[in-house]
Image (tube, rainbow, N blue to C red):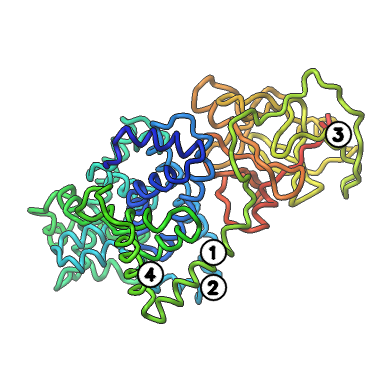
Amino acid sequence: MRLMDADHAGLVVAAQAGDDRAREELIAAYLPLLYNIVGRALSGHADVDDVVQESLLRVVRDLPALRAPESFRSWLVSITLRQISNHRHRQRVFAGRSTVIDEAHQIPDAGAEPGDMTILRLHVSDERRQVVEAGRWLDPDYRVLLSLWWQEGAGSLSREDIAAATGLTAAHVGVRLQRMREQLELSRTIVAALEADPRCPQLDEAVIGWDGLRTSVWRKRIARHTRGCPVCSATTTERVPVERLLLSLAPLAVPAGLLAALAAKGLLSGTAAGAAGLATAPVAFGTATGGDSLHSLLIGKLHAVTAHPLVALATGAVLITGTATYITWPEPAHRVPGVIAAPTAGHPTPSPSRTTTPAGPSPVSPPAAAGTVALGAQSLESVDEPSLYLTYAGDFATLGRVSASSSAQTRQRVTFTVVGGLADTRCVTFLAADGRYLRHRDLRLRLSTNDGSELFREDATFCPRPGAVAGSVTLHAHNYPGSVLRHRDGGIRLDGPDGTRAFADQASFIMRRPWA
């Protein structure tokens, strides 16, 4: 069964109705695609299996809320891209905190099948190996795009799927793909020049002080030399087109360790896990194979994976680390479609009660359903800084102190009118007293006038969910799934959760009665 078969829409509907068998068939059919996207995007990182598991758990959790079963593939890819982005953010947060932990990232994952290992095992050409290495020089967003382009060439995704998953138009995707390919060709030249024997003497001078890390800074520095160097650029002559090299590489096989982990979580049965493992082999999905033989194949792979003591230890550490790391961030068990904004019109307003904070008496907003924001005038108090409120200075949002003795202007600036979301009425938009709207731009929360554009409406729409403490909310960007507003470095920024309680507190607000 190919991924484009219309029958999968029927499986989605059945899985949404609670059919476990249909859900397992869906996971088994799409697991190879998901694994290849993550594996290529993360260049065989040891956390590939964890990111795949996180993606599938969210797919199963949010499946009942999917309104268009025929868009399941692009919807699944969009969730996968979000988890890849979250993983990259966690890596940046934890980078440098512990060299011992960072060194552990270099331990090979026996269950994974990273691109360069696959190439060596298959004895493919040196030029194909250089393409995989060049992909490691790409900017992170382009590495993800290369992964999607790879799947498009293999026939597993269409250009429309990529556009829907990334939230771009097909034309915009084409532009970004062209830019990615230009950076990839540049990186191919860099890889070939660095591996040349003998290497260009001028290149040796250009890389003095290089720490060996493939960063954009060093890519640009080395490229400045290779562009004008006849010795280094000679490697570009008679180069095989990258499309042919990528499509000639075998897809990454789903490792047995991941199949076992998914089976342990109840996402796959033994038979479905075996089918997912065979999906990348040259056998049509759905070929009649006895469940016993599939089970034996899975068990045989598991014995091979766990035979080495270091591998067994590393596999156990990954599972334990994954459990300990990713359960901290509070998220609802299911995202059920419905109105998130809680309108107050037509309801009696209770008399304001008061709680005492270090800043003085602070009015408490009427209670609302968990994870909702009532429409009307509200003030947002930080959970992490109980005496500080969301306010603004000039064009940028920040946190500020307010009390009963504050000036009228100060109280007015911490008061926002909550209206139905401009891009989605199930969410909310915040209007300041001066007529400007809160919207994110360049990952910062700021105030802007409504220019009537679709981009503005998306940027100004935020979807509330339950926060770190009872009665609080987090505000998720409508057009940047997985990103939330948090206070950091004196401002309010759009950021991806890192799984810590500190982040959860910084991204949570309590809705208070308006100060103005």
Give the distance between the C-alpha atoms of the residues marked 3 and 1, in whole angstroms: 42 Å
Quadrant of res 389 = top right
Q: Is residue 265 left or right of residue 176?
A: right
Secondary structure state at the residue bearing disc 4: loop
Q: Which residue is mark 3?
A: 407
Q: Which residue is mark 1?
A: 94
Q: Residue at x 61, y 45 (%)?
A: 333
Give the distance between the C-alpha atoms of the residues marked 3 and 2, in whole angstroms: 47 Å
Using the image, tell me which numbered label, if any, was put on residue 109.
4
Q: Is residue 211 visible?
A: no
Give the distance between the C-alpha atoms of the residues marked 4 and 1, in whole angstroms: 20 Å
**Residue 399, position as x, y percentages in the image:** 72, 44
Q: Residue at x 16, y 53 (%)?
A: 248
Secondary structure state at the residue bearing disc 1: helix
Give the class, few, some or many, for how many residues have Cα within 10 Å of label 3's Cα (few <14, many ≥20). Answer: few
Secondary structure state at the residue bearing disc 2: loop
Q: Is residue 375 visible?
A: yes
Q: Given contact means CB atoms under 8 Å apart, are the residues at marks 2 and 1 in contact?
A: yes
Amino acid, disc 2 = Ser
Amino acid, disc 1 = Phe
Q: Which residue is mark 2?
A: 98
Which of the two discs, 3 and 2, labels the residue nearer the N terminus?
Answer: 2
Give the distance between the C-alpha atoms of the residues marked 2 and 4, in whole angstroms: 20 Å
Amino acid, disc 4 = Asp
Which of the two discs, 3 and 1, labels the residue nearer the N terminus?
Answer: 1
Secondary structure state at the residue bearing disc 3: loop
